[in-house]
Each structure stands twice: as C-alpha cells, then as structure tokens.
Amino acid sequence: MEAAPEIAQKMVKRHALSTRIWHWLNAFVAMILLMSGLMIFNAHPQLYWGDFGSREDYAWLQIDDTRTTGFVRIGSTSVETTGVLGLSLDAKENVRRVAFPGWATIPTGYDLAAARRWHFAFAWVFALGLTAFMFMSLVNGHIRKDLHVRRAEWNPRALWNDVKNHARLRFGDDYSASHYNIMQKFSYIGVIFILLPLLILTGITMSPAMNAAWPWLLDVFGGRQSARSLHFIAAALMTLFVVVHLIMVLLSGPFNGIRSMVTGRHVTTSKPEKAADLA
C-alpha cells in the first residue's frame, strides 16, 4: 500500500504591523461609534431624503411604536418588532419606548448629549486611523501586494468559481487561505475606499460647523437629511460586513485567522511538491 504523502507546514507573513494595529483599533472604535450612533438615532428615529425632516414629514424609514407595539417601517412596508426595536423591556423589566434597546447603545440609558460626545470623540480616531492606514498601505505595499486585482482574476470563469466556492463553504487549502481571493479583495476595497470614506464624509456633512467650512458637501450628498440617511445605510452595510467577516473567519479556521491578525504570521499546509513551490 502506498504511503500517504506527508504534509509540510510553513509559516508565511500575511499582515504588516500597521494593518494589524489598524484592524484591532478599528474594531474597537467602530463598535463605540455604532452603539453611540444608535443612541443618537433614538432621539429622532426617522430618516428622510433632502434638506429637511420632521415628525410631520414623510420618512422613508421609521423605527417607532404605537404605544402597544414596536415596528419598523421602510417605505410602505411595516414589520412588528415588539421586544426588540421600537418597544422593549430594560434589565429591570421597565418598558423602553425607543428605537434601539439599551444593550445596543452607548450610554445604555437615554442621553443624547453623552452619545454625541462619545460619537464625535471616536469619529476623529476613526478618521485619523483610516488616513494613517491608507498612507502606510501605500508605503509598505499592502495595496499593491494584497488588494490589487490582477488581470487573471477578472476572468469571468475565475470570478464564478470563487463565488461557487464561497457558497459551498470551500475556502481552498491553507496556502490559498493565506492570500486574499477575489471576493475578499472586492469586499476590502469596497469597505476601505468607499464605505469608510462615505461614513466619514456624510458624518461631516451633518455637522453645522463643517457646513460653514465646506458648504459644497451639502450639494454633494443632496442635503443634511440625505447625508443622515446615507450615513445610516453605510453603518448598516458596515455592520453586515463585520457579521459576514466573522462568520468567514469561523468557517475557514479561527485559530489560524486570528493568529495571523495578532502575530502577522499564517501557517500553510501543503503536499511536498507544493511546499517546494512555496520555498
């Protein structure tokens, strides 16, 4: 009987120090921004398009209550969300008539002024951190080496194969997992260069002080209320990205994935002939 081929292991460098620092800092800051942002949203749980918006105006999204039930309305479609959104109970079984419950907000009790202080303070950390990360990614070659989409990857067959592999939860061998596939590249490019800047710019647009300095932002985003809506949508997409990202980490091997983001090193396993190619 032929012996099974030996499996070779090799430690490869995957993430630069600047990438790892930004990743963990951004994870913490994004959580603070999301939770404080939800408290700010509780002050007026409706979204509009254009320059103005009030309780009497038509809102394309509303999270509220009818005194007896909570609901979420998007356009003309309404869904009851009693116990979660709009109307829920706090830790002491007291009824809370706010869009998002206390466990999802900072502070946990209603305090718009405190939520704004939290949000604005960490927004600066978020914006400066993203700027520093982009600069370092150009310096250390992270964008060129890891995020650049090469010509062969634009092949429709390659794109479709990657989509099918993700749908079937097939992530390839560890060597493949140590490099970004095309789906990861599209996701990270979209988040880093589109979604995060959109969050920052729409946040700035909602600030009256920044409107005085950069009034053109109101024209770019179609008014303060439109900017608020886009800010909320971008935050929701960012939250969805984080959820999918965590699921993918768990499915593809959490120990190796977390270790690579802590130490920068990723362990690959391969047959001898593939290991020779990697050397």
Image: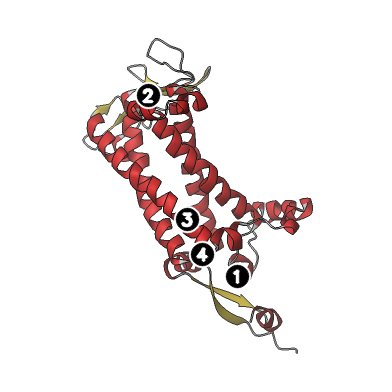
Instruction: Give the quadrant of residue 100.
Output: top left
Do the CB atoms of the residues marked 1 and 4 lie less than 8 Å apart? Answer: no
On residue 45, the disc is 2
- Depth check: 79 or 115 in front? 115
Of the image marks 1 and 2, the number of the one nearer the N terminus? 2
On residue 218, the disc is none
Of the image marks 3 and 4, the number of the one nearer the N terminus? 3
Q: Which residue appears farthest toward the top when viewing the image?
A: 56
Do the CB atoms of the residues marked 1 and 3 lie less than 8 Å apart? Answer: no
Instruction: Give the quadrant of residue 185.
Output: bottom right
- Find disc 3 in the rendering and name its residue: 135
- Find disc 1 in the rendering and name its residue: 174
Do the CB atoms of the residues marked 3 and 4 lie less than 8 Å apart? Answer: no
Q: Position of residue 192 (x, y in %)?
A: 51, 48
> Which class describes the residues within 10 Å of circle 4: few (<14), some (14-19), or many (20+)?
some
- What is the three-letter code of the residue carrying label 4? Asn
> Which class describes the residues within 10 Å of circle 1: few (<14), some (14-19), or many (20+)?
some
Of the image marks 1 and 3, the number of the one nearer the N terminus? 3
Give the residue drawn at x 71%, y 88%.
3
- What is the three-letter code of the residue carrying label 2? Pro
Give the residue drawn at x 38%, y 48%.
128
Horizontal side of residue 80 vs 186, given as left or right: left
Task: Point out the image quarter for the N terminus.
Answer: bottom right
Of the image marks 1 and 4, the number of the one nearer the N terminus? 4
Position above or below: 279 against 29: below
Give the residue drawn at x 60%, y 76%.
269
Q: Secondary structure at mark 2?
A: loop
Of badges 1 and 3, nearer the viewer stands 3
- What is the three-letter code of the residue carrying label 3? Phe
